[in-house]
Image (tube, rainbow, N blue to C red):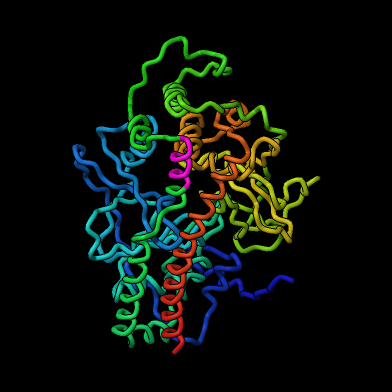
């Protein structure tokens, strides 16, 4: 049963943003509780376009380069190394989609704010990172670290409440943030114990930093196991990938090029595969073992809404295990919609994503106890499991074998959204060793990722402790 909120038309008439959606009106409902206005705690900082030294490399971050924990993993760009794969980034930058945030400021993602991609630009950061203007930059007028953690925890629902449901996903504007009412009691409680809070947070952040120093990424583990098994020199491979020129002849139009592609990217992929497969004797076309492939369905959906849950791109992981924790739902229906419900054991491929993530693959390893829709940007792939272990295939897709293949065969004018089709899957030549070796590779990867997951649990416990400290202090 839905909630009903009664509001007078006079409220609508006096609302400067002319917004009347439920979540927004609920968030600005008049209250007897004292509160601080946005202007009492923050000010929006104009994000001016910097002048770049084109002779020097620089670090740049889009929303996809920021984790849900506020960590930034920027790309390094150089005008001297401008090429087809990073051209879209340079075009965005040349159009002014770049700024250098000030130390001590906070960045909030203006796209899908529910993902909690909030970044604190620390005072002691040694390296400048430029950001896309899809982040809103705000300047705290009191302790920036306390306000940063407060925004990530106790005030995160308020940020989501004032966001707008755009076409396909929520968005946030600077004026939306200005409507938030921050509880005076909460802020005063945090500031009253400011010194103690910072001391406790410092200790926990130190522990997190030490744990992260021994942590290895899932992709690093996957790549290491595959490179070791197939005796691939990763240094040589990465050097080949960075090579900007490819010399080709008409002989490149062969039986392995049925669509007669002759682009730089296609030939770069063939050059890389020639290097990778030179000493591997089990290369076969994937199409030989594909039984069926089906795209998903992406009806209109709402974050936190009612209806049937829908998965998204954020649920695909490098460890080859689908993270079944949807945040969006739909009330739409269609004939045979049960064909789009996920099942335990399903193998999914991302058919549309950034150039680095397209083709990422995962298996549903958990029991599915409710109807959950897989989206149009997923391909559900059924294979001959007598020959190919689906977890092996997913991990191979996520390794350098798959990453470099899909990076170059994907199509799209904008490298932030490229796509693959069933043709790229059917024509993918890849190593298919005996089942015993496939299981050995999967086992090694799962064992090592399991050890890293324990470290990640410890890190998450420390983050939760920070969250609890902030929340308990706010309520005291």
Q: Give the range drawn in magenta.
A: 222-230
The residue closer to the viewer here, 142 or 370, is: 370
Q: In this view, does 204 lie above or below 448?
A: below
Residue 55 placement (x, y as % from top left): 19, 37
The residue closer to the viewer here, 246 or 136, is: 246
Residue furthest right as drawn: 335
Q: Which residue is drawn at 49% across and 61% down?
A: 453
Residue furthest front as drawn: 436
Q: Which residue is drawn at 43% across and 44% down?
A: 224
Which quadrant of the figure has residue 379?
top right
- 203 relative to 334 in the view: left or right: left
Image quadrant holding the C terminus, namely bottom left
- 288 relative to 179 in the view: left or right: right
Residue 298 showing in the rendered view: yes
Q: Is residue 258 above or below residue 59?
A: above
Residue 313 showing in the rendered view: no
The residue closer to the viewer here, 180 or 255, is: 255
Residue furthest bottom as drawn: 476
Q: Residue at x 52, y 49 (%)?
A: 444
Residue 249 placement (x, y as % from top left): 42, 11
Residue 118 placement (x, y as % from top left): 40, 62
Image quadrant holding the N terminus, namely bottom right
Which quadrant of the figure has residue 421?
top right
Q: In this view, does 217 lie above or below 19?
A: above
Residue 394 placement (x, y as % from top left): 58, 43
Which quadrant of the figure has residue 201?
bottom left
Query: Mainly helix, strand or loop, the magenta region?
Result: helix
Magenta stretch contains residue 20: no
The residue closer to the viewer here, 238 or 296, is: 238
């Amino acid at each position: 049963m839905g909630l009903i909120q009664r509001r007078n038309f006079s409220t609508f008439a006096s609302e400067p943003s002319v917004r009347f959606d439920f979540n927004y009106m609920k968030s600005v409902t008049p209250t007897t509780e004292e509160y601080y206005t946005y202007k009492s705690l923050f000010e929006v900082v104009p994000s001016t376009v910097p002048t770049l030294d084109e002779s020097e490399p620089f670090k740049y971050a889009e929303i996809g380069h920021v984790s849900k924990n506020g960590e930034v993993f920027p790309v390094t760009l150089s005008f001297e190394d401008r090429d087809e794969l990073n051209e879209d980034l340079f075009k965005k930058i040349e159009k002014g989609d770049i700024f250098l945030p000030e130390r001590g400021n906070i960045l909030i993602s203006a796209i899908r704010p529910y993902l909690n991609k909030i970044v604190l630009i620390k005072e002691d950061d040694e390296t400048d990172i430029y950001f896309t203007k899809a982040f809103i930059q705000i300047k705290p007028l009191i302790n920036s670290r306390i306000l940063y953690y407060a925004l990530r925890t106790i005030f995160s629902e308020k940020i989501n409440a004032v966001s707008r449901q755009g076409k396909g996903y929520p968005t946030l504007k600077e004026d939306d943030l200005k409507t938030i009412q921050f509880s005076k009691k909460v802020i005063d409680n945090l500031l009253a114990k400011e010194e103690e809070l910072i001391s406790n947070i410092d200790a926990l952040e130190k522990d997190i930093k030490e744990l992260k120093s021994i942590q290895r990424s899932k992709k690093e583990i996957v790549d290491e196991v595959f490179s070791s098994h197939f005796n691939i020199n990763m240094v040589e491979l990465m050097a080949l990938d960075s090579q900007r020129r490819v010399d080709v002849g008409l002989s490149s139009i062969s039986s392995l090029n049925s669509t007669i592609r002759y682009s730089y990217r296609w030939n770069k992929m063939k050059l890389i595969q020639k290097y990778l497969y030179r000493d591997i004797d089990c290369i076969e076309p994937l199409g030989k073992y594909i039984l069926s492939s089906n795209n998903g369905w992406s009806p209109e959906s709402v974050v936190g809404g009612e209806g049937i849950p829908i998965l998204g791109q954020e649920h695909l992981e490098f460890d080859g295990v689908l993270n079944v924790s949807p945040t969006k739902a739909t009330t739409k229906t269609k004939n045979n919609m049960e064909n789009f419900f996920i099942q335990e054991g399903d193998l999914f491929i991302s058919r549309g994503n950034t150039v680095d993530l397209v083709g990422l693959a995962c298996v549903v390893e958990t029991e599915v106890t409710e109807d959950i829709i897989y989206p149009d940007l997923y391909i559900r792939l059924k294979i001959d499991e007598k020959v190919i272990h689906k977890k092996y295939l997913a991990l191979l897709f996520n390794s350098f074998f798959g990453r470099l293949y899909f990076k170059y065969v994907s199509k799209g004018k904008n490298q932030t959204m490229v796509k693959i089709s069933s043709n790229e899957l059917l024509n993918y030549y890849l190593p298919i060793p005996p089942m015993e070796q496939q299981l050995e590779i999967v086992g090694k990867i799962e064992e090592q990722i399991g050890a890293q997951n324990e470290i990640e649990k410890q890190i998450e416990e420390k983050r939760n402790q920070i969250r609890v400290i902030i929340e308990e202090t706010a309520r005291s």
